[in-house]
Amino acid sequence: MRFMILLKADKDTEAGVMPGGDLLAAMGNFNDELIKAGVMLAGEGLQPSSRGARVHFSKDGSVRVLDGPFVETKELLAGFWIWRVNSKQEAIDWVKRVPMPMLSGEAEIEIRQIFEMEDFGDTMTPELREQEERQRAALAG
């Protein structure tokens, strides 16, 4: 099972406040543990939403681009990991070990399972499965 672990933004991350050396070292050590355990597949911090954009698609086919920053900090992300674990509970157990990532002393991390090809059942035709496998191989290669 793969899970995306989403670190929610706060006022400091949205203001572009960079983490100190102690936090970077603690996160580096935690990431080392994840890698040694074979859990971590990817992980990155994200720039503030002021450097981002949202693209809105309407039923009428129109596309609208909205540049950041975005107002609702609680809906924004500051970073992510992708982990391979055996269960949601294992992901929860790892998240409980994350070093406090926010200067404010308050943080929220969301855990979301990633769909696998098997989750789509018969909708995933042999042709779609082959396409998915080819894309994954190209990304890995």
Image: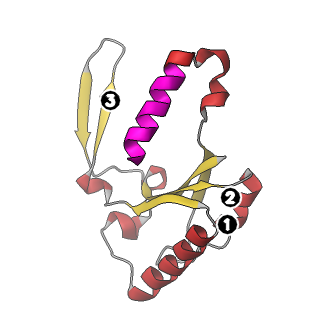
Q: Nearer the viewer, residue 100 or 45?
A: 45
Name the kind of residue labelled 1 in the image. Answer: Trp
* Location of residue 18 by image quarter: bottom left
Kind of element beneath mark 1: helix
Answer left or right for 72 relative to 66: right
Q: Residue visible at 48% across and 29% down?
A: 132
Name the kind of residue labelled 3 in the image. Answer: His
Q: Residue visible at 36% across and 60% down?
A: 46
Residue 90 against residue 98 in the figure, above or below? above
- Label drawn at residue 29: none
In front: label 2 or label 3: 2
Q: Position of residue 78 (x, y in %)?
A: 42, 60
* Location of residue 137 by image quarter: top left
Q: Is residue 8 visible?
A: no
Residue 91 against residue 66 in the figure, above or below? below
Categorize mark 2 by other alpha carbons within 10 Å: few (<14), some (14-19), many (20+).
many
Tell me, yes or no, whether the two marked residues, 2 and 1, touch with CB atoms within 8 Å: yes
Q: Tell me the CA gap for discs 2 and 3.
A: 32 Å
Q: Earlier in the sequence, mark 2 or mark 3?
A: 3
Kind of element beneath mark 2: helix
Answer left or right for 32 relative to 90: left
* Residue at the disc numbered 1: 94
* Residue at the disc numbered 2: 91
Q: Position of residue 17 (x, y in %)?
A: 33, 74
Residue 65 against residue 96 in the figure, above or below? above
Q: Earlier in the sequence, mark 3 or mark 1?
A: 3
Q: Which residues are magenta?
A: 128-141
* Residue at the disc numbered 3: 56
Q: Is residue 52 visible?
A: yes
